[in-house]
Amino acid sequence: MKFDLRITAVVIVALALQTGGALLWAGRAAARLDEMEAQVAAARPLSERLARLEAQMNEAQASLDRIEKRLDKSLDRPR
């Protein structure tokens, strides 16, 4: 079996280029994942605070509803 050295060299170079491209792509993907994980970790305290604020707003709304009902009842009473 006889191999042409030019074809063999071209195949080796092509494989090396494809492998290099795959490694670069994997490195960029890993860097993007690390960046996204850092952003999510930074946003976690903000989301927890937002949830607490939402709960407080719901409690304030419930209190306001109770106050309005009491006012309506006191205004509806005959004097």
Image: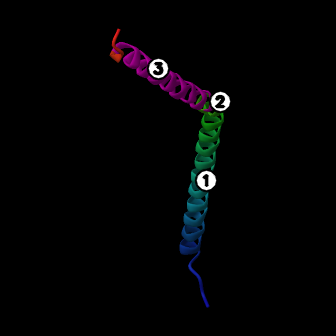
Rendered view: 57 above or below 20: above
User: Disc 2 or 1, which lies upstream in sequence?
Assistant: 1
Nearer the camera: disc 3 or disc 1: 3
Q: CA distance from mark 3 to mark 2?
A: 29 Å
Quadrant placement of the N terminus: bottom right
Q: Which residue is mark 1?
A: 26
The residue where tag 2 is placed is 45
Q: Position of residue 9 (x, y in %)?
A: 59, 69
Cβ atoms at labels 2 and 1 below 8 Å apart: no
Q: Nearer the viewer, residue 70 or 76?
A: 76
Q: Amino acid at mark 1?
A: Ala
Q: Please tell me which residue is depicted at 59% across the width and 40% down the height of the picture.
A: 36
Residue range of the region highlighted in magenta in the rendering: 48-75
Q: Amino acid at mark 2?
A: Pro
First-in-chain label (3 vs 2): 2
User: Mark 3 belongs to which amino acid?
Assistant: Leu
Name the main secondary structure of what is drawn in magenta.
helix
The residue lying at 56 percent from left, 79 percent from top is 4
Q: x%, y% of residue 18? A: 56, 61
Q: Which mark is residue 34?
A: none
Which residue is under mark 3? 64
- Separation of disc 3 and disc 1 at Cα? 55 Å
Asked if the residues shown at circle 3 and circle 1 are in contact, with their CB atoms under 8 angstroms apart, the answer is no
Residue 35 is situated, as x and y percent measured from the top left of the image, at: 61, 38
Report which quarter residue 44 is drawn in: top right
Left or right of 45 on screen, residue 66: left
Label 3 packing within 10 angstroms: few (<14), some (14-19), many (20+) = few
Quadrant occupied by the C terminus: top left
Q: Mark 2 against mark 1, which lies toward the viewer? A: 2
Query: Which label lies toward us, 3 or 2?
Result: 3
- Dividing the picture into quadrants, the one containing residue 47 is top right
Above/below status of 28 relative to 57: below
